[in-house]
Image (cartoon, rainbow, N blue to C red):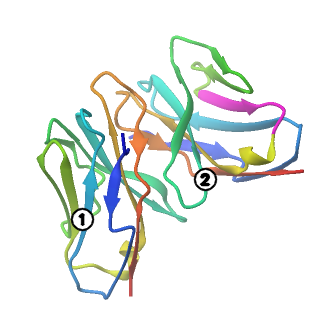
Amino acid sequence: GENVEQHPSTLSVQEGDSAVIKCTYSDSASNYFPWYKQELGKGPQLIIDIRSNVGEKKDQRIAVTLNKTAKHFSLHITETQPEDSAVYFCAASPSGYALNFGKGTSLLVTP
Amino acid sequence: DAGVIQSPRHEVTEMGQEVTLRCKPISGHDYLFWYRQTMMRGLELLIYFNNNVPIDDSGMPEDRFSAKMPNASFSTLKIQPSEPRDSAVYFCASTLQGGETQYFGPGTRLLVL
């Protein structure tokens, strides 16, 4: 089955700096790659996603890049703010329904 | 819309007891997912349904776990008998056919003593 590796497990940045989280996947059939943000005590919430026919997607301060050949994708957050502090999960899916999640990255943005 | 509703929010039980977790998906959504979250294993998909029919239950850890969806607005995840290693946060999520965003509930925090 699909195996998703996520790095780093923890990341601390200063407010205003950029944060980058990287994921690799193993199943070449995967074609859907969402990113979820989980705040303390809450369920994960989708923040951005990308399909395999697209190399990059941007939404305000958040961007995701995908390299299908190398089987890796990354989340970029620019101009980080304290409210960006949370746990971020990448996922990969061949169907768009059964999501295989990475282990998560705990991001801390310090003022 | 109220979003995905899960109950109870917290459950503490003793080893060997039966535990039933409940989920009400967002109205109109025809896919429902059950996930388990632990520090060691992260977020794992246990089972998902489409139009009340189980599609993939390969993530269900063992026969002690069972899930049902008797109608479009209700699902249960049952653990019988429960064991300490079942302690985790269990999430339910739902989405639309053709949609990709999964909407997660607030989770049920289960502690088995």
* Contact flag, marks 2 and 1 (Cβ < 8 Å): no
Q: What's the chain of the residue with tag 1?
A: B
Q: Nearer the viewer, mark 2 or mark 1?
A: 2
Mark on residue A39? 2
- Residue A52 vertical position relative to residue A9 in the rendered view, above or below: above
- Residue B28 vertical position relative to residue B70 in the rendered view, above or below: above
Q: Where's residue B12, x and y in %?
A: 37, 82
Q: Quadrant of residue A68?
A: top right
Q: Where's residue A76, x and y in %?
A: 73, 30
Say which of A60 and A106 sits in front.
A60
Task: Answer left or right for B80 relative to B34.
Answer: left
The answer for how far apart the CA atoms under marks 2 and 1 are is 30 Å
Q: Where's residue A12, x and y in %?
A: 83, 51
Q: Where's residue A21, x and y in %?
A: 71, 39
Task: Answer left or right for B104 relative to B82.
Answer: right
Determine the residue located farthest toward the top in the rendered image. A53
* x 62%, y 37%: residue: A23
Mark on residue B62? 1
Say which of A27 and B57 sits in front.
B57
Q: Which residues are magenta?
A: A72-80
- Mark 2: few/some/many CA within 10 Å (<14, 14-19, 20+): some
* x 60%, y 50%: residue: A104
- Residue A82 vertical position relative to residue A93 in the rendered view, above or below: below
The reply to whether label 2 and label 1 mark residues of one chain is no
Type of the residue with mark 2? Glu
Disc 2 is placed on an element classified as loop
Type of the residue with mark 1? Glu
